Amino acid sequence: MKIATFNINGIRARAQPLCDWLDEARPDVALLQEIKSLDENFPRALFEDRGYNVETHGQKGFNGVAILSKLPLEDVSRGLPGDDGDEQARWIEATVVGERALRLCALYLPNGNPAPGPKYDYKLAWMERLHGRARELLRSEEPALMAGDYNVIPGREDAARPEAWESDALFLPETRAAFRRVLNLGFTDGFRVRHPGPGHYSFWDYQAGAWPRNNGILIDHILLTPQAADLLTDAGIDREIRGREKPSDHVPVWVELDL
DNA sequence: ATGGTGGGGATCCCA
């Protein structure tokens, strides 16, 4: 089962390039971020026509996450637990049943800039809630994953120019520590465990020629519970689509699980 | 230090 995460940066602007990628890459599951759409405006038929079941958690203008799955989705839950007052649509989860059941969590972690400030406070609070949900997933001792745009550069090898990110909310020591605290609960980074070392990126800014200069960062991650990590057979990044017409600033990151 | 680009929706916010 091929499972991809992709920050599409707006479903209306990305409908065609997203469909082109789906038709070529043929993921069984696509976890989408930044759909920037209300649920009722999401073009579900585009994906249902391609054999996908569709679950969304959208909001107007910003954020918004979705799950596309060729197999049926069960037990859908919207919103990250831990703050009933949080209005931002950044989390959706569901169970897909292949030979075994797999719990899927799609997330769009807050950017947090400028730091320090209220946006950075929100980011760190959100990561603390993520930590809580992560602990619960591990307690289930079932195959599960949390994938999406983490807005975290975990280490210097995850940026072409780490020195340019030193004071950025994506790379501050406190951000990286919060990410490690989740990882160190017992998750495996599904891409990194197969592809260590520098030069692997999932985001290139639209500005200042970041793509032609390959000035990228790796901020889209797929965290696997031990039971999911045991099923990992392959992982990759579909970097070439960043060079196409009307690209997102992110590209898909994917894992293949034997289920 | 600045401005560079893009999406969405509203004349500005977010990244």
Image (cartoon, coloured by chain):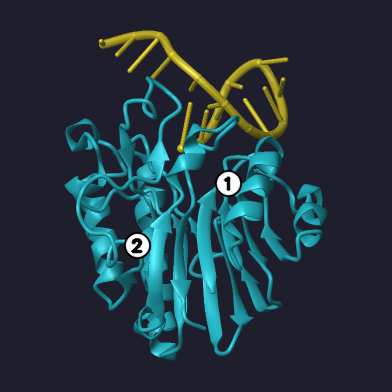
Chain colours: A cyan, B yellow
Is A189 on the left or on the right of A231, as rendered? Answer: left
| SS for dot 2 | loop
Residue neighbourhood size for the residue with mark 2, other residues' Cα within 10 Å, grouped as few (<14), some (14–19), many (≥20)? many
Find residue A34 and name its label. Answer: 1
Establish if A118 lies above or below A149. above
Q: Nearer the viewer, residue A84 or A91?
A: A91
A227 or B3: nearer the viewer: A227
Q: Mark 2 points at which residue?
A: A191
A25 horizontally vs A235: left or right: right
- What number is the disc on residue A100? none
Q: Residues within 10 Å of mark 1 (few under 14, many from 20)?
A: many
Task: Please give the name of the residue rendered at 41% of the width and 44% of the height, measured from the top-left corner.
Answer: A111
A136 or A46, nearer to the observer: A46
Whole-percent x and y of residue A38? 74, 48
Q: Going 37% across and 26% down the picture, which residue do you hit?
A: A212
Q: Residue at left 37%, top 60%?
A: A127
Left or right: B13 in relation to A218: right
Q: Looking at the image, tell me whether mark 2 or mark 1 is earlier in sequence order.
A: 1
Q: Is residue A197 above or below residue A192?
A: above
Does residue A251 lie above or below A44 as drawn? above
Q: What residue type is labelled 1?
A: Glu
The x, y position of residue A4, in whole percent, is 51, 61
* Residue A104 in view here: yes
> How far across and how far down the image is residue B7, in percent?
63, 32
